Structure formats: C-alpha cells, structure tokens
Amino acid sequence: MSRIRIQGPEADLENATLVEGFPGIGLVGKIATDHLIEELDMRYYASVHCKGLPQVGVYRKGDRTVRPPVRLYVSEDEDLLALQSDTPISADAAETVASCLTGWLVDEGVRPIYLSGRPADEDGAHALSGVATGDGGDALESIGVELPSEDGIISGPTGALLNRAAQLDLDAIGLVVECSPNFPDPEAASELIERAIAPLADLSIDVERLRERDEEIQHHREEFAQRMQEMGQDESSQARPLRMYQ
C-alpha cells in the first residue's frame, strides 16, 4: 500500500515548502537537498513507501540503523521539508510515485519545489531558469528567476511530479540549472540553492562549504552518476530541448 509513514512527532506543515532531491543529471537535486538537510540539521520525519520504489534497505557508515531509500526530513523552524532519495527511480514507477507524493503534499498544504539539471552547452555554464504550475510562477517572478530560453521537457520522477502538479493546478515550482551531463556537479547545486531555493524558502544557507567539498563529492558520487547514465534518459530527471522529440 502506498503511504507516507511519519517517524516521530508530527509537524505542522501547512504553508511549508518541500525541496525534492530525486537523483538526476549532474545529481544537482540530490546534492542540493543533501546539503540542506546537513546544514539545517533537519530531522528524519517520514519514510516514503509509494508503490514502485526500490525495496532496499539503506545504512550509513558508523550507524547500524537501516532505513528506506526515500525519506522526508523536516526543519520546523524553517517550515521546510526535504525529500532525500538514495536510489534512482525507474521510469515505470515515476507516475505512481508522483501520484502518491502529490496526494500527500496536497493533504498537508505543502508547496513543492522540484529540481532538475539540463546538459550545459559549454563548460562551466550554470544558467538557471524556472517553470511553474498554478500560481507558482509569481514566486519565481518575485526573485528574478529567468524564463526558459527554449521549448523543453523534464523527464524522470521530477517530470512526473510536475506533470501531476499541472493536472491538479497545484502551486508548484520547477527549477532547471545547466550542469555537467556526465559527472556530479556541486557547483550547479550551489547555484540552485543560492539563487533560487534560499530566496524562495526564505533560508540563510552557506554554500561555500559545498563548493569547497567539490573534489570529495566528485569522488564519492561518480559511481552513482554512472548508474544514472546506465539507466537511460527517460529514467533520469533532467530537462531537455523539446526539439529532441520533434
């Protein structure tokens, strides 16, 4: 049965913001979300048991505790939720997972921010743009996030979440940053946080430590990025020009 299982005290989430971190191109969403969880010392809040998610147990170095691969963390002081995923999501499961998560977000009154990378046209480019459903575009306008420069499509679980938000006319935001198509890109994740996530969620977040750890992050996550490439384009969250489908 699809469900979100609360772990510990319940939080008042009405008007809270969710930042989504499903793995995708450049791992930008995952890196950004992991950094928020660490910097804000966010509390493990709920395990996600949507149909189609990998049935695996995740554990950490120096800790015997096994947890599900997709989890929600909360900072009650910041009215912030973060979705952390330690495994890629298959294309077959994306629609079911999106429906499961979106139903819970609507019930809780949470505004989602969905994150995606786009292959950079040139080395070092980290252009940022935003899309939205419902009235989400008003928030993007207020902080000066650029409009998309061309027609495009967002695939993977992030694309499915945005599709579901559009169906329901939910106020949701999608951020797209140019990043490395082949390797983890902490710099692009830093741009997401500094230029969009922090102002949208009214956060004060230091990203310098993330930038300083670029080499360490690259070392630990290149294997994960290779797994994402092997899954194929349709199973990885990423934004691509729409002309590729025409």
Image (cartoon, grey):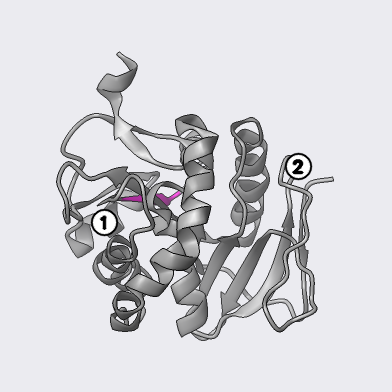
Of badges 2 and 1, the one in the foreground is 2
User: Label 1 belongs to which residue?
Assistant: 140
- Residue 12, percent across and down? 63, 75
Crowding near pointer 2: few (<14 within 10 Å), some, many (20+)? some
User: Label 2 belongs to which residue?
Assistant: 51
- Magenta span of residues: 171-176
Amino acid tagged 1: Leu
User: Which sits in the foreground, 208 or 155?
Assistant: 208
User: Which sits in the foreground, 217 or 100?
Assistant: 217
Q: Could you tell me which residue is drawn at 19 percent across and 45 percent down? A: 147
Secondary structure beneath dot 1 equals helix
Quadrant location, the N terminus? top right
Is 146 on the left-hand or right-hand side of 212? left
Task: Tally the marks.
Answer: 2
- Residue 105, percent across and down? 60, 55
- The secondary structure that most of the magenta stretch takes on is strand
- Residue 83, percent across and down? 57, 62
Secondary structure beneath dot 2 equals loop
Is 66 on the left-hand or right-hand side of 226? right
Q: Is there any visible trace of residue 242 in the rendered image?
A: yes
Amino acid tagged 2: Lys
Is 126 on the left-hand or right-hand side of 33? left
Quadrant location, the C terminus? top left
Q: Could you tell me which residue is drawn at 31 percent across and 63 percent down? A: 192
Residue farthest toward the right in the current orientation of the protein:
1
Q: Could you tell me which residue is drawn at 21 percent across and 41 percent down? A: 148
Is residue 174 rendered magenta in the image?
yes
- Residue 101, percent across and down? 63, 50
